[in-house]
């Protein structure tokens, strides 16, 4: 069987992006949470906030490192697998990626070390500033990346001449029509991910009676956050859907499994899309609800896939079911957030085993929802690489063979598997130790070397002969050495 380099290249990029995406969506939300904890500690002096901040900073360090390692190779693929696209889009994507490095990576590099290692070396205010700057840096990074990605969906401010994109308006290109909605949607997704992970881990500790006071505070904070963010995400998602309907109607038609342009379209809860025959099997739906959601009218017109040439239709079944996974998990998040509010009376939110066990399960769901959402977004754009202007086939490297694409795909899977295994191992060690791994500042001061290579010297003890004599030092006998 002949290997198709286009299919393999798309699978490879999808794998790398999906693997990488789960890390930034967590660290963006977690960085903001750490900044809030540092602010509370600075204002109140309560050691509980410092303990929580120190613990989650360790988690952040591991996950941030995994995200950096997994994200480095993504830009390489533009040159190896998508050279035509890289050359055509260089006038726009080149500066955009450079802006991310200059404005976000430099900012994070300057303050990340202070956040991770400077707690006992800099004033508390400086450490708080470092936490805030790292959080700001994560959002600046997501700004440039999401702007560039949104441009692929709703290209603006450019014109295609002789196979290359030329900028006609930087403002229109950066703030393209879908960018504001996608930026808000992903920002809220990051807070949801961070909130549910912190809530799930805190619930796990509470079930075991570990650091009850600190984890009770952490869980309470997260439940208040989720109560606000989860419903807000549904509202922003609705606006995002309306924007997608305007600019990418074929994607919306695939999301709804709607083949014929019509009115009073039902919201399908279940169906088996048959793209070969341009129909669905075993439909179960709510009459008129899709029209109401998409047009805010019961008899609103919803576009059908029959308006698009078959070769330009996205993979309907994949988009259809990924969308339902994302929405279903979003509704579940809202339900748990509401349950947390109900259980607040009498402190039942941290005393109810069933609720705590449920939060443990929910800590995984944001990652699944984010991946499902990315599948909807990226697969729904198919076969367009730059929507309406360049297809995936046109952007592929001409000299790339199926064997080369398969070899690199297998290599990425092996390397990423090792990275993920090592990262999870160290992350589990951090979680196993928990918040109990704390030391007094005085102990840190005694154990920290004061000059280069001092940690390699033989320790000395001070003996005082009497009040009139200064201490004399001699090496401690250690096993005859």
Image (spheres, grey):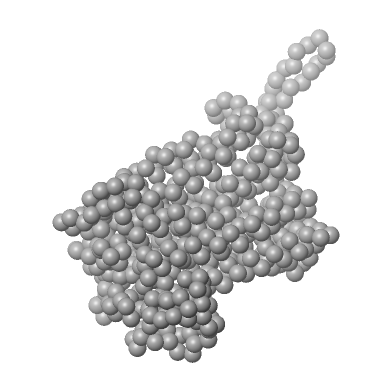
Give left or right: position of 379 versus 184: left
Residue at figure coordinates x 35%, y 61% from the top left: 153
The percent coordinates of residue 20 (x first, y second) are: 45, 58
Could you tell me residue 266's position as x and y percent? 50, 81
Q: In terms of depth relative to the viewer, which is nearer, 447 or 170?
A: 170
Q: Judge from the rendering whether residue 164 lies leftward or rightward of residue 344; answer left or right.
A: left
Task: Check the image and name the residue furthest to the left.
Answer: 162
Q: Residue at 55% x, 29% y: name it.
A: 453
Give coordinates of residue 378: x percent, y percent: 39, 66
Determine whether 262 is above or below 421 in the image. below
Task: Tell me the quadrant of the picture where the C terminus can be found.
Answer: top right
Residue at the outermost top position: 468
User: Residue 451's quadrant in the figure?
Assistant: top right
Identify the image quadrant of residue 1.
bottom left
Give the x, y percent position of residue 185: 50, 58
Which residue corresponds to the image point at 81% horizontal and 60% vertical from the top-left? 345
In the foreground, 403 or 4: 4
Q: Name the residue nearer the viewer: 400 or 459.
A: 400
In this rendering, the answer to whether 196 lies above or below 126 is below
Q: Which residue is depicted at the point 43% across and 63% down?
A: 243
Is residue 205 shown to the viewer in this render? yes
């Amino acid at each position: 069987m002949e290997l198709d380099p286009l299919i393999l290249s798309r699978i490879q990029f999808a794998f790398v992006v999906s693997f990488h995406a789960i890390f930034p969506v967590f660290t963006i939300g977690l960085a903001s949470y750490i900044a809030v904890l540092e602010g509370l500690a600075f204002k109140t002096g309560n050691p509980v906030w410092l303990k929580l901040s120190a613990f989650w900073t360790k988690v952040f360090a591991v996950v941030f490192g995994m995200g950096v390692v997994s994200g480095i190779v993504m830009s390489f693929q533009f040159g190896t697998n998508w050279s035509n696209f890289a050359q055509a889009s260089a006038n726009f994507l080149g500066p955009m990626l450079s802006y991310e490095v200059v404005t976000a990576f430099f900012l994070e590099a300057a303050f990340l070390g202070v956040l991770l290692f400077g707690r006992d070396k800099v004033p508390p205010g400086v450490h708080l500033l470092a936490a805030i700057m790292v959080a700001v840096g994560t959002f600046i990074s997501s700004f440039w990346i999401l702007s560039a990605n949104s441009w692929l969906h709703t290209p603006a401010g450019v014109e295609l001449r002789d196979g290359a994109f030329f900028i006609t308006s930087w403002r229109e290109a950066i703030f393209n029509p879908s960018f504001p909605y996608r930026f808000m949607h992903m920002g809220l997704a990051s807070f949801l991910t961070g909130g549910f992970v912190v809530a799930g881990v805190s619930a796990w500790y509470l079930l075991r009676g570990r650091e009850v006071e600190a984890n009770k505070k952490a869980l309470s904070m997260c439940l208040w956050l989720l109560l606000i963010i989860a419903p807000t995400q549904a509202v922003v998602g609705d606006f995002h859907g309306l924007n997608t309907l305007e600019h990418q109607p074929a994607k919306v038609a695939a999301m709804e499994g709607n083949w014929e342009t019509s009115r009073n379209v039902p919201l399908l809860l279940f169906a088996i899309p048959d793209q070969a025959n341009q129909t669905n099997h075993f439909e179960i739906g709510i009459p008129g609800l899709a029209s109401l959601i998409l047009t805010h009218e019961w008899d609103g017109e919803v576009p059908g896939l029959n308006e698009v040439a078959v070769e330009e239709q996205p993979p309907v079944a994949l988009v259809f079911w990924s969308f339902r996974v994302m929405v279903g998990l979003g509704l579940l998040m809202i339900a748990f957030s509401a349950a947390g509010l109900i259980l607040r009376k009498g402190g039942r939110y941290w005393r109810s085993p069933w609720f705590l066990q449920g939060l443990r399960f929910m800590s995984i769901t944001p990652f699944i929802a984010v991946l499902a959402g990315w599948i909807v977004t990226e697969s729904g754009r198919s076969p367009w690489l730059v929507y309406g202007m360049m297809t995936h086939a046109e952007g592929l490297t001409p000299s790339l063979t199926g064997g080369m694409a398969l070899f690199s795909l297998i290599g990425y899977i092996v390397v990423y598997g090792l990275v993920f295994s090592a990262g999870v191992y160290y992350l589990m060690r951090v979680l196993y130790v928990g918040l109990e791994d704390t030391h007094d500042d005085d102990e840190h001061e005694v154990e920290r070397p004061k000059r280069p290579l001092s940690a390699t010297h033989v320790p000395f003890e001070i003996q005082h002969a009497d009040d009139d004599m200064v201490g004399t030092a001699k090496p401690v006998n250690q096993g005859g050495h």
